[in-house]
Image: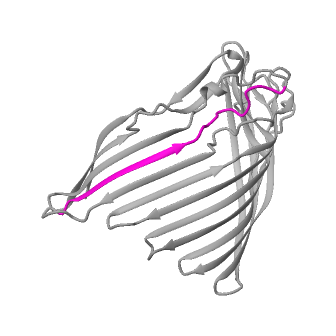
Amino acid sequence: NAHADLTSRSTAVYGDATYSFTDKTDLTVGLRYTRDEKDFVLTIVPNDFGFGVVYTATPGVEQNRSWNNLSTRVVLDHELSADAMVYASYATGYKSGGFNPRASGSVPFRPFDEETLLAYEAGLKSQWFDSRLQLNFAAFYSDYENLQTDIFTANSFGAGSETVNAGKAKIPGVELEALALPFEGVTLSLNYGWMNPKYEDLLLRHPLTNDFVDMSDGAKFGYRPDQTLAAAVTYTTQPVGSLGLVLSAGLDVRYTDDVFWHQVDFAPDGAAINRFNDLIHADAYPLLNAHLTVSEIALGDRATLKATVYGRNITDEEYITAGIDFGVSGFAGANFGEPASWGVDLTVEF
């Protein structure tokens, strides 16, 4: 048994300034300086077979680490009209390094370094038809260095998770948001996202030698679907009848593209790393939900009741929400999402 004690301290100073070229064009520049310090001690808890040991000189491990970073942000925006503006931005990002006490005993325990990011974005924010349509669009490009990646390991020493600086990755993508009020009481919404993440370098441990090998060729970007979609329609009435009840009905659908839980199935030489990765990955799936609500139901002079009948995943889709491959142990596991369900919510407001 082991006990991990991690102390973190973070100090930052930041500020920004805006210069207006015209009454419609602004340039904003921001700076942020960050210093992070982390102290780590790993203790083996005494048991019937030995004594507690504090790891103060484990080979390759520094128990005290610090990181410094100066991040910048530059935004140029231009107002096309009172209801529309375009913008372009450049920013640098930073995530401090640290320690992962869950590393498997089969590999040397070591800290991981900071991750850095260059982020580019351009887009449009707008309202149309007397604010009855809101339309926002953004295109982005993210460039990661020293990418922090968790590697799950399972072997005769047990199971663990090691965090390493795997390498480089680039993520281009687009986002679209739309909100419309076409008729009185009707609200339509749409959110769509697309990205195409790619590793340029992906240094992972070989399962047999523990050496770091570039496995970027054909690697999958874990936990990130390439496409997501959410759309909804809601109709809400004005107060109805002498009781002033408000009725609302809605339908929404959410779509998630394929998701993988591990980056690599096999090493370049064919050695199995996550042989069940394809089997336990989440296929693309839609979820359809619906609700019917009656609100403003008077309960005496000071309280109201809201009653909602809802259905979730009403088409009873079977989908996976998480998975893990136990490697050489010869098995894998997956968690499935909630099946079709129906229910009633009652809310009392005073």
**Display coloring:** one colour
Q: Which of the 4 image quarters holds residue 16?
A: bottom right
Residue 218, image x and y in percent?
Answer: 77, 35
Q: Quadrant of the C terminus?
A: bottom left
Answer whether residue 258 is magenta in the image: yes
In the orientation shown, which residue stands out farthest toward the top?
49
Residue drawn at the location 71% of the way across and 52% of the way down = 9
Answer whether residue 14 is magenta in the image: no
Residue 341, image x and y in percent?
Answer: 35, 35
Q: Is residue 182 left or right of residue 168?
A: left
Magenta-tinted stretch: 244-268
Picture layout, residue 73 above or below residue 204? below
Residue drawn at the location 32% of the way across and 58% of the way down = 235
Picture layout, residue 291 above or below residue 236? above
Residue drawn at the location 71% of the way across and 33% of the way down = 101
Residue 138, image x and y in percent?
Answer: 63, 62
Picture layout, residue 86 above or below residue 344? below
Picture layout, residue 104 above or below residue 345? above
In the orientation shown, which residue stands out farthest toward the bottom?
22
Q: Which of the 4 image quarters holds residue 215?
A: top right
Picture mark count? 0
Q: Is residue 260 left or right of residue 103?
A: left
Residue 137, image x and y in percent?
Answer: 60, 63
Q: Quadrant of the N terminus?
A: top right
Residue drawn at the location 72% of the way across and 59% of the way down = 11
Q: Is residue 241 left or right of residue 14?
A: left
Q: Nearer the viewer, residue 40 or 312?
A: 312
